Amino acid sequence: MKAEFGETFAAYNGDCVEVMREMPSASVDFSVFSPPFANLYVYSDDLRDMGNCKDEDEFFEQLGYMTGELFRVMRPGRLIAVHCKQLARYKGRDGAAGWYDFRGDIIRHYESYGFQYHSEVVIWTDPVMEMQKTKTQRLLYCNLRKDASVTGIGMPEYLCIFRKTPQDGDDIVPIRHYKENEERPDTADSELQVMDLPTWQRYASPVWFDIQRTDVLNAKVARDNRDEKHICPLQLEVIRRAVRLWSNPGEVVLSPFMGIGSEGYVSLEQKRRFVGIELKPSYFNVAVGNLRTAEREASELTIFDFLDCRAGA
């Protein structure tokens, strides 16, 4: 296993289950990530890659090893945010065209490991862009004119939120947001975050209509010709809102599927600490560069002691 450290991040090139097993219990304050989308994409040729599964049942069996460790390392009372979308069924491959309820299985999966299904955000997507990118028959105007029964609706994305419900006696640390002119405690531990009412009302909307699809880190340099066919980085503003809402400055954010480092880039930008794990070497190398850039750009950050989250160091 390869590891790279900054003053506010720890990044691991290895299997997320193996790395997380070395992390202390209740050491993570928030986790946000986009898991492999079952057998939709080929991310790498590594047998440990959870995207390399024959069907959905095998995928969720493999994902369970990570989920159990994630539940253990999460602080009681805190949240995880899982980015997902429904998956397409195709007539040639599946016998009939339609959707597979991947989001629903994600919810049931995390509930089965002890997480409470807390809430979710629907992320609006442009059906015209989806049609141009995927050429799906569902969104073709010519099919609407021929036979509307074969047409359908654009496919949104979701941010599903789960909570590790605290038990009696657990040490609970609240996540606080303050008004601009509100009296706040005098503390040197971390910067206190301000969120005004209009911002909260916008974030609390069940549908985020204002997410720009191109608001992502540049993923092209992470691609290699051997095995990778697709990369779908999560939009930075989605991560930014989640990190601001559900963690305090200075706390630890974890991504078990770091990819090119989007969650870490935003976490450092927002003055959090970050632990990221990525199996694919080309992604990992790009992620470390992005994390070092974010750390350099946020050089006003407090220097944190990272001994408590350097798993396996």
Image: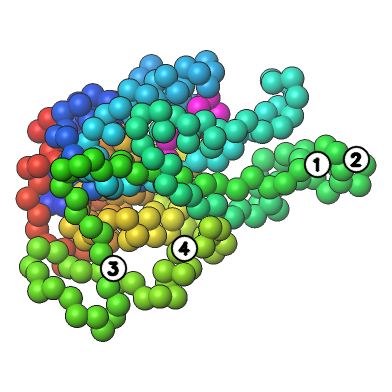
Q: Which of the two residues, 170 or 104, is positioned nearer the viewer here?
A: 170
Separation of disc 2 and disc 1 at Cα? 8 Å
Examine the image and state in which quarter residue 101 appears. Answer: top right
Separation of disc 4 and disc 2 at Cα? 38 Å
Q: Which residue is mark 3?
A: 177
Separation of disc 4 and disc 1 at Cα? 32 Å
Which tag, 4 or 1, sits closer to the chain's start? Answer: 1
Give the residues in magenta. 34-40
Asked whether, in this view, residue 160 is left or right of residue 98, the answer is left
Magenta: predominant secondary structure element?
A: loop
Which tag, 3 or 4, sits closer to the chain's start? Answer: 3
- Under circle 1, the secondary element is loop
Q: Which of the two residues, 242 or 274, is positioned nearer the viewer here?
A: 242
- Under circle 4, the secondary element is loop
Q: Which residue is mark 1?
A: 151
- Looking at the rendered image, the quarter that the C terminus falls into is top left
Q: Which residue is mark 2?
A: 147
Amino acid carrying label 3: it is His
Q: Nearer the viewer, mark 4 or mark 2?
A: 4
